Amino acid sequence: MSTQDEINAAIAAHGTWKIGLKAAIETGSSEFSPSIVAQDNRCDFGKWLHGTATTALRGSTHYTKCVELHRQFHTIAAKVLTLALGGKKDEALGSMSVKGDYALASAALTKAMMDWKSAI
């Protein structure tokens, strides 16, 4: 898979997290645990970033920025899931709102991935 394909797949996959987190907020349950969600090397994009991404890519500023924003995204997603599982719906939804931590982290990561894809 090309770098652009990896980035496209990551954007789509991370978009589905929003749906899954909203479901967890509504139901108070999830098939995932916050400790797993917090790990940025478990999703396909994280496996690629930390594993099979080429050395040439690892030297780019786009790579470095995406690694950091991806780590932040997973940390915040885990916090939202913790709130959801703890029944703290309002706090979890606040993080998902337009100005919330999750929404901002997701937007920053998506923008960085799009910038990287454009630069290739």
Image (tube, rainbow, N blue to C red):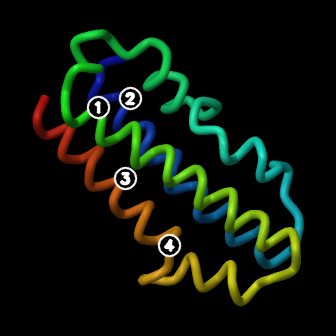
Q: Which residue does the numbered mark 2 point to in the structure image?
A: 6
Front residue (pair 76, 96): 76
Sooner in the amino-acid sequence: mark 4 or mark 2: 2
Tell me the distance, in whole angstroms, between the alpha carbons under discs 1 and 3. 11 Å
The picture places residue 86, in percent across and down from the top left corner, at: 88, 74
The residue indicated by pointer 1 is 63
From mark 3 to mark 2, how far is it between C-alphas? 14 Å
Residue at coordinates 36% horizontally, 63% vertically from top-left? 107
Pair 4/2: label in front: 4
Which of the labelled discs sits on residue 109, or is there none? 3
Distance (Cα) linking label 3 and label 4: 12 Å
The residue that label 4 is drawn on is 101
Q: Nearer the viewer, mark 3 or mark 4?
A: 4
Residue with the most extreme left position: 119
Toward the bottom, the furthest residue is 90
Quarter placement of the N terminus:
top left
Q: Quadrant of residue 40?
A: top right
Q: Is residue 67 left or right of residue 20?
A: left
Sequence order check, earlier mark of 2 and 1: 2
Q: Looking at the rendering, in which quadrant would you find the C terminus?
A: top left
